[in-house]
Structure formats: structure tokens, C-alpha cells
């Protein structure tokens, strides 16, 4: 009888152990879920990892298109007090005359990215007769809004003051950016263009409006109301803006809402080249920005695609120079720049 009891008890103990083991994934899932609810860090780091993979692929794919004959000045300090206050400068090796200068702010959802990811494309643009600058800025959650805009102003001030050293024409500067970088570039241009907006966001322009001759805005995110959307897209926007603002309820923060640059544009905004792919979930925001600028009387050149365009062009399509549409975007960009 005792032996029978022992035989019965063993399966029960084994069953309880298996139940505890089976519960481990559920507990871990609940812990991870809770982490995503109480802090922007888990989501921001996930986005950073995914974007990092995509950025590496883009850089690798552009290698075959990089021309020779380009001089590069890497890790130039625009703010020696700031570890992130660095920029890279590219220009043709031949010649000494100052050139129209494109100051490019990289994308990455405000939570990822690096100035080096623009390097291949910057060299390609430089070969067309420009000086191209890729600006490093502090990303979230480590840094918060409006730090990148202030850093962009610092970079512009430095470049203007040191123009002769790097073939920069301080009177022919083009602000450029992709994705989150397009938002930062657009906000920087809007602050420089509007004294009222500069006062509202408490940012001092780094250069004068007359020095900016244009903007290049690719695939930007300009509308924080997109965070109200559902699905993966809504989660992404909410996560990165929570990280960038430092507040989960950022939609109720009047200070942060001023980053919604479409609401603060004026007729003084520099001529803009605005583009996005038809498969880009952020494309409607680029269309809205272009319409707003056109309504104000600002000069705008659009490059959008029909909804049924095949293949559908994804976010950051312009960096794919193995695709005819990416090549067209490059040619249209150069033509726009040379027409300024």
C-alpha cells in the first residue's frame, strides 16, 4: 500500500513541475509586456535594433554606386562639449571654390541612426558638385526633444563660421533629411524662417534665413496625431514619440506638440523638394506638408507616386539606387538643387 502511494505521488510531483515549467514563458511574456507599458526603453531599443539591420543593408547596397574623387572630413566637432556634436563633410577633391552645401540630418525614428549611414549617399551627391554634410545628433530616449533641433542649429552655426575650410558656401545652404531627420530638418528650417515660431519653441536660429536656399524632405513624419492610430504603425509612432518626448501622454503636452511642424509653416519657408514612396505609411504626412506649403505660397516640388505604382515604393525608397525610381529621385533632387 505504501509503495502504491509513492507511485501515485511521483506522477503528481512531475505534473506540478511541468506545470511550473510551462508557466515560465507566460510569466516572461507578462514581464516583457509590463516593461513595454511602463517605459519607452524596451520599445525604443527594439526599434533601434530593427532599424539598425535595415540601415546596414542600405549602406551595403549603396557601396557599388559610390564614386571616386571625393574628399571626406570625418568626425569634425561642431560642439566640443557634446559627445554627439560631430559631423562628416564630403566634397569633390578637385577644385577649391565654395559649393552649394547640403546639410543632411539622418533618420531613425528619433531613437536610432548615425551620421555614417548617410555617408554613401552623401558621397554620391557630392560627386554631382556639392558639399554634403551629415550631422550627428543625440537620439532618444537618452536625449529628448528639442535637443536634435538645438544641435542642428549648432552645426549650422559652426559650418557658417568655418565655411572656407570645407568648401562650404554659407550663403547657399540646403537643409535635408529623411524620415525623422526630415522632421528635424523641416522644424529647423521653420524656426529659422519664423521669429514667432523660434520664440514659441525657445530655440535660437544658428544662421539667418537668407543663407538657406532650399530643403530636401524625404519620407518625413510630421504629424504626431498619427500616434492615435492602431496596429503596428500606431504602436511604432506612439513608442518613438514617447521616447522622444519623455512623456507617455505626449499628445497632451503643448510644448511637445509644437514639433508638429505642419501647423507652424509660413510663406517664408525655403523652397522645398518633398517626396515619399506610395508604399510608405508616412506618405500622407509628406503630401499634407507639401499641400500646406503650396497653400501658403511657398515654392514646392513634389515627387509622389500613384497608389497603384508597382512595385510599391517603401519608406526611404530614395536610397535604393538599384531601382529606377530611386535613380529618378536622385536625378530630380540634383535638378532641383541646381535650379535654386
Image: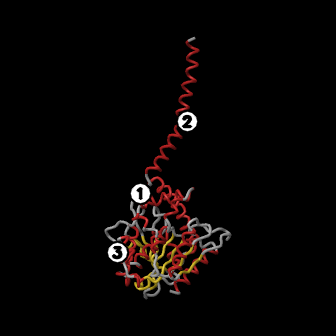
- Residue 116 percent across, percent down from the top left: 46, 69
Q: On residue 200, which mark appears?
A: none
226, above or below 169, in the image: above
Q: Residue at x 47, y 81 (%)?
A: 267
Of tags 3 and 2, the one toward the viewer is 3
The residue carrying pointer 1 sits among few (fewer than 14), some (14 to 19) or many (20 or more) residues within 10 Å by Cα, namely some
Q: Earlier in the sequence, mark 3 or mark 2?
A: 2
Tally the marks.
3
| Whether label 1 touches label 2, CB < 8 Å | no
Q: Secondary structure at mark 3?
A: loop
297, above or below 8, in the image: below
Identify which residue, 70 or 295, lies in the foreground: 295
Q: CA distance from mark 3 to mark 1?
A: 24 Å
Query: Which residue position is annotated with label 2?
Result: 22
Q: On residue 247, which mark appears?
A: 1
Q: Residue at x 56, y 56 (%)?
A: 230
Q: CA distance from mark 3 to mark 2?
A: 58 Å
Q: Residue at x 68, y 69 (%)?
A: 308
Query: Which residue position is annotated with label 3?
Result: 204
Amino acid at each position: 500500500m505504501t509503495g502504491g502511494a509513492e507511485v501515485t505521488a511521483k506522477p503528481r510531483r512531475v505534473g506540478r513541475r511541468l506545470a511550473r515549467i510551462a508557466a515560465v514563458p507566460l510569466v516572461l511574456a507578462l514581464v516583457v509586456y509590463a516593461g513595454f507599458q511602463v517605459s519607452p526603453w524596451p520599445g525604443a531599443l527594439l526599434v533601434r535594433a530593427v532599424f539598425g539591420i535595415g540601415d546596414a543593408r542600405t549602406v551595403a547596397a549603396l557601396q557599388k554606386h559610390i564614386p571616386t574623387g571625393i574628399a571626406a572630413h570625418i568626425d569634425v566637432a561642431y560642439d566640443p562639449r557634446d559627445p554627439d556634436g560631430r559631423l562628416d563633410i564630403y566634397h569633390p577633391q578637385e577644385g577649391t571654390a565654395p559649393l552649394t552645401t547640403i546639410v543632411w540630418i539622418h533618420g531613425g525614428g528619433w531613437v536610432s541612426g548615425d551620421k555614417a549611414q548617410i555617408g554613401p549617399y552623401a558621397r554620391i551627391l557630392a560627386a554631382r558638385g556639392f558639399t554634403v554634410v551629415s550631422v550627428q545628433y543625440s537620439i532618444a530616449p537618452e536625449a529628448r526633444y528639442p535637443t536634435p533641433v538645438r544641435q542642428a542649429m549648432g552645426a549650422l552655426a559652426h559650418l557658417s563660421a568655418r565655411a572656407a575650410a570645407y568648401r562650404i558656401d554659407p550663403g547657399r545652404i540646403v537643409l535635408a533629411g529623411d524620415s525623422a531627420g526630415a522632421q528635424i530638418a523641416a522644424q529647423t528650417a521653420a524656426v529659422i524662417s519664423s521669429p514667432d515660431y523660434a520664440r514659441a519653441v525657445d530655440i535660437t536660429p544658428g544662421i539667418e534665413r537668407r543663407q538657406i536656399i532650399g530643403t530636401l524632405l524625404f519620407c518625413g513624419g510630421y504629424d504626431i496625431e498619427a500616434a492615435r492610430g492602431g496596429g503596428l504603425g500606431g504602436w511604432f509612432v506612439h513608442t518613438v514619440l514617447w521616447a522622444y518626448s519623455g512623456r507617455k501622454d505626449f499628445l497632451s503636452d503643448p510644448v511637445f506638440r509644437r514639433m508638429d511642424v505642419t501647423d507652424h509653416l509660413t510663406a517664408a519657408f525655403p523652397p522645398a523638394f518633398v517626396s515619399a514612396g506610395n508604399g510608405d505609411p508616412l506618405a500622407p504626412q509628406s503630401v499634407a506638408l507639401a499641400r500646406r506649403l503650396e497653400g501658403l505660397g511657398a515654392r514646392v516640388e513634389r515627387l509622389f507616386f500613384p497608389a497603384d505604382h508597382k512595385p510599391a515604393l517603401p519608406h526611404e525608397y530614395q536610397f535604393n539606387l538599384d531601382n529606377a525610381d530611386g535613380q529618378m529621385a536622385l536625378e530630380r533632387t540634383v535638378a532641383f538643387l541646381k535650379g535654386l
